[in-house]
Image: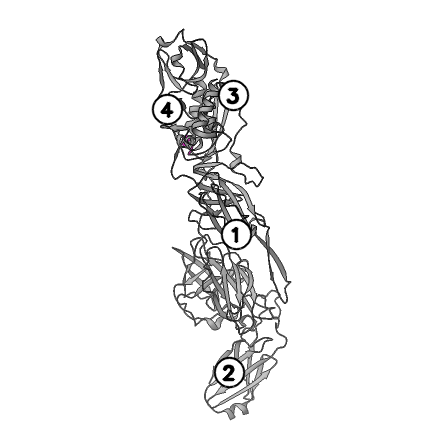
Amino acid sequence: MATLVLSVAGTYFGGQVGGMIGAMVGQQIDQILFAPKPRQGPRLGGLSVQTSSYGSQIPKLFGTMRVAGTVIWATDLVEHRSTRGGKGQPRVTSYSYSASFAVALSARAIASVGRIWADGKLLRGLAGDFKSATRFRLYRGLEDESPDPLIVASEGAGQAPAYRGLAYALFEDMALEDFGNRIPSLTFEIVADPGTVPIGMIAEDLAIGAVSAGETPALLGYAAMGDTVREALEGLADVVPLSLSDDGDGLRLSAGAVGAIALPMDALSQRFEMVRRGQGTVPGEATIAYYDAGRDYQTGLQRAVRGGNRGVDRRALPAALDAGAAKGLAEFRLASLWAGRTSGKASAGWRLATIRPGSHVEVEGQAGLWRVERQSLGAMTVTLEMMRVPAAAPPDGAASSGRPVAEIDLPQGPTVIELLELPIGDGYETKPVLHVAAAGESAGWRRAALSASFDGGASWQEAGVTAAPAEMGIALSALAPTGSALFDLESSLEVELLNETMWLEGRSDDALVAGANLAALGPELIQFGTVEALGGRRFRLSRLLRGRRGTEWAAASHWAGEPFVMIRRESLIALDAPMGAEARLLASGVGDDPDGAPATRIVQGEGLRPPSPVHLKVREIATGDLAISWVRRSRQGWAWTDGAGTPLGEETELYRLTIAGAGFARTVETTSPAYLYPAAARAADGPGPVTLTVVQAGSFGASRPAVLIID
């Protein structure tokens, strides 16, 4: 009868949820919210696995929690195709995919979303920056929100739900390349209510006013799931001291020791009965599984142990706690189990009928605090069955979250691009090649898509994606000119790299001969053997080799602030480019401004030139003729691997020699690296110094000149 009356009254005043609360109070079999009930095991896993099944329950979130959510809408995958390669290399077509989808987060309104993880890796940082390309919109679950325009465009006007009252996140055109070209499993850091949230506030919200709350413990976050208030809060009921009582105006939830009812002995109609069970019936260990705020809200476990017993009591809370609070709850749970060895029974007149199951009482002459588990109405009597509970609230225990694996959270930032047209290929190129080096000023930079234009920006084409971040920066001083034949032991170069994660190391002379520590300094290629770290991303480089791969012509053209780029095959991509064109390259990364300025360079075919001849010398023979000779070099012969001659690297061997002096200049062509300057011609040209200039005619362009002045 009590169940019926209280259910009707609760429904009248509080609707369906109020009826549930009323039924819980009146129904002695259910013993309200706080009685033991067969459990189905831990309930934490449901918040960490993303679902898309129809009918999946969506939790009501309080405080700050990390949840996976439920996919409620999605488009088909969109395929993107790009082709790279050219003459001399196979053409490779690669495919990538993107998708748009919506993920439900909470069945009540939230304040904001913090970090987001995809397949366990950070997708969105604390600063709100995304590590992979996507457009993102958050709908907080407010009642006045409109349908998302993308869903409207896909489903049609009038067919797109607004999902009012349901907080959800919308990802538009999310790049899936980082996730195996599939929608990843996402988890979200949700801030539903800023700060901690009292358990009483949660109960009031779920009961829609049918329960009022006094002072109750607070949680960092909580995920309420279930069809009733009892189901939503029962995970807390046996590990947190709570009391639900009828104060005459309604149901009131408070901390267990607050508002305890005094039960004097003279109010009892018979002697107080007390029973104590043996120690062997009580577990010797209690564990609490929870979401650990110190571990990015991943699952944590704290335990309390009392020796001598084998059993373990396990509880799982869909709540966010710090390690100390969870440890305190485990200790309180174990103390409750041991205190619960002692039960009592008291009978009194109907004036004690207001003491409901779930109320806490203090029995005169009996130590401790007692919780009413069951109330029975008899002939003019009320029988209360009670269990002893700890009087003290759970303390914060001394506990640690352990050492979590830290997820790097650094903004990707904008892309910095350097376009290099230098002889750093294999020498078999038949058209100009630009090498693209890219990195970011932020250590969180990963990569960016590239678009290229070779007609002044009139048209653009996909150019693939950047390679691994290059170690790059700027020179802080102008390097003095010197020759390329020997080590430069006098000069040093200070450089500043883009970000603090980049590092340079010295190498041995043997390693340098094998090609180590090759770098582009403006138009010159250099190598360095010694590195001194100066701090603050700065390094001093010395023991230099200059003018590598035929770039000695650039040794005298340096300036402070010119780009410095380490040449590593894994950090460069190659783009074919038309001769004479103005190449423009634009990066489209997560941190890039779509209206940013592109990197530019006029394509001059520098990598197609044969290197200039070397060892230009003149020897006068007995006839008075001058024997002019030189040594050719090859763009295919930077490493002398066979000890034999250098490969030609061009279709034919041809040189152009210019002999010039005061008032004259003569040019001859020769197919060998030598020329005989006849004495008669020398006499006809007149006295004074003579300048000899030799270039090698290559298949796609002439070398830079080798020059010698003779008297």
Instruction: Choose between 420 and 555: the one closer to the eye.
Output: 420
Q: Where is residue 508 in the image (x, y as percent from the top left)?
A: 49, 58
Which region is colored magenta? Answer: 320-325
Q: Where is residue 487 in the image (x, y as percent from the top left)?
A: 46, 66
Which of the two discs, 4 and 1, labels the residue nearer the N terminus?
1
Q: Quadrant of residue 677?
A: bottom right
With respect to residue 707, does 544 lie above or below?
A: above
Which of the two discs, 4 and 2, labels the residue nearer the N terminus?
4
What type is the residue that disc 2 sits on? Answer: Leu
How packed is label 3: few (under 14 Cα within 10 Å), some, or many (20 or more)?
few
The residue where tag 2 is placed is 692
What type is the residue that disc 1 sits on? Answer: Leu
Q: Where is residue 529 in the image (x, y as percent from the top left)?
A: 47, 60
**Whether label 2 touches label 1, CB < 8 Å:** no
Which of the two discs, 3 and 4, labels the residue nearer the N terminus?
4
Q: Viewer-nearest of labels 3 and 2?
A: 3
**Whether label 4 touches label 1, CB < 8 Å:** no
- Spatial CA distance of label 4 from label 1 is 49 Å
Which of the two discs, 3 and 2, labels the residue nearer the N terminus?
3
Q: What element carries label 4?
A: loop
With respect to residue 148, does 539 lie above or below?
A: below
With respect to residue 597, does 339 lie above or below?
A: above
What type is the residue that disc 4 sits on? Answer: Asp
- Spatial CA distance of label 3 from label 4 is 43 Å
What type is the residue that disc 3 sits on? Answer: Gly
How packed is label 4: few (under 14 Cα within 10 Å), some, or many (20 or more)?
few
Label of residue 311 in the image: 3
Q: Viewer-nearest of labels 2 and 1?
A: 1
**Whether label 4 touches label 2, CB < 8 Å:** no
The residue where tag 1 is placed is 150
Q: Is mark 1 on a helix, strand or loop?
A: helix
Q: Is residue 323 shown in magenta?
A: yes
